[in-house]
Amino acid sequence: MLAVILAAGEGTRIRPLSRGVPKPMLPVAGQPLSAHVADAAVAAGADELVFVVGYRGEAVREHFGDSHAGVPVHYAEQDEQRGTADAVHAAREHIDGPFVVLNGDNCYDPEPLSAFFEGGPAVGAQHVDDPTNYGVLTLDDGVVTGIEEKPDQPPSDLVNTGAYRFPGEAADLLEVSASERGERELTDVLAEVTDTHTVRPVEMERWMDVGRPWELLEANERYLADAERAVAGEVHEDAELRGPVVVEDGASIDAGVVVEGPALVQSGASVGPNAYIRGSTVVGPDATVGHSVEVKNSLLMRGATVAHLSYVGDSILGRDVNFGAGTQVANLRHDGADVELTVKGERVSTGRRKFGVVCGHESKTGINASLEPGVTLSVGATTGAGETVARDR
């Protein structure tokens, strides 16, 4: 059974982290998000994978090569992002029979996903509190009869999660007309399939769409929760590792360090001396957490450096970010309200009482800088020494 994984988009809602990196290749618990999708697909029953690539597609090709988890991998190029049906159409030459479509920037568990590889036509579904922002499934006696996009009066609370199993003949339906958004949508293909086939809703456990920075942090928390203790790197005898801590070969933990799991310290990273790591934290490849630094519930990408006397909480630091000595991240509003973050030019609630900052690749802070909750630093942005930053830059 073929699984088509959609990995062509940049991810404008998760900028600046997606600048130069396709969103499905952003790191989550030590590997790209799309690798978690591929792992789940293979575990669920896929014996062949096709990645649809576009924006910075070479990153996907370089990571996966010609096989993943023992199954062959192919690629299809979507030159312009003209919708999900258009993306699958780009993979048309690889489709010969029933096929499964998955989003490369979603989180799936293998167990419910296996239903897509075992039965007939199906669509992923999940109950949500507010279905007005989703495509809502209409059902008749447990069978999917259609989808209503973002209805004011939803017919149910069961929404489309963007995972599908199509019959082979659906490959001839992919050239649907453009929607009001100007895109060719898989939901329109699904609507046509419901006219001729019985389509089952498959309820997805722990499904999550990773579209915005705090959701990347949540995905990191989710996958780290399954970590098991494994220590292959160099750990000083005066360091203390508590619980499920993974220290990869080539990583080093210096004296006086305390790491409370779940946590992952990747190859080439160094921690300490006298540092404190806790709360679902990833110290990425070649990253540095130095003297008297505390990092809590955060993601430090490749080469990020927090070298001296700093605090980082509930934050994401992009590649090669450099925090000057004494940089402090605030992650809690004084009024106790949920922290807001800028997404595509608008301030949006993260739904999180504690959230720190998002730092684009190669951004830098001066010594003794303070960053307020919900601040975003763009790629290459800088702050002055002793500066308090309360607005994005």
Image: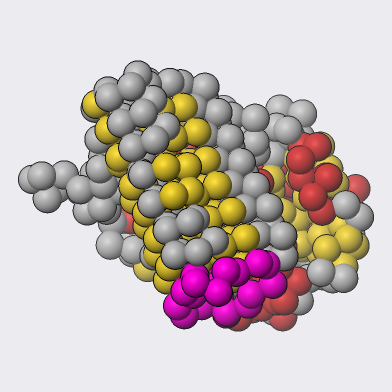
Location of residue 111 by image quarter? bottom right
* In the image, residue 369 above or below residue 39: above
Location of residue 344 by image quarter? top left
Counting from the top left corner in percent of width and height, residue 346 is at 31, 28
Counting from the top left corner in percent of width and height, residue 86 is at 71, 38
**Residue beneath the point at 46% across and 27% down:** 364
The magenta stretch spans residue 228: yes
Question: Quarter of the image containing the N terminus?
Answer: bottom right
* Drawn side of residue 93 relative to residue 26, left or right: right
Location of residue 162 by image quarter? bottom right
Which residue range is magenta in the image? 224-245
Question: Quarter of the image containing the C terminus?
Answer: top left
In this view, the residue in front, 312 or 179, is 312
The magenta stretch spans residue 332: no
**Residue beneath the point at 87% across and 68% down:** 71
**Residue beneath the point at 30% across and 31% down:** 368
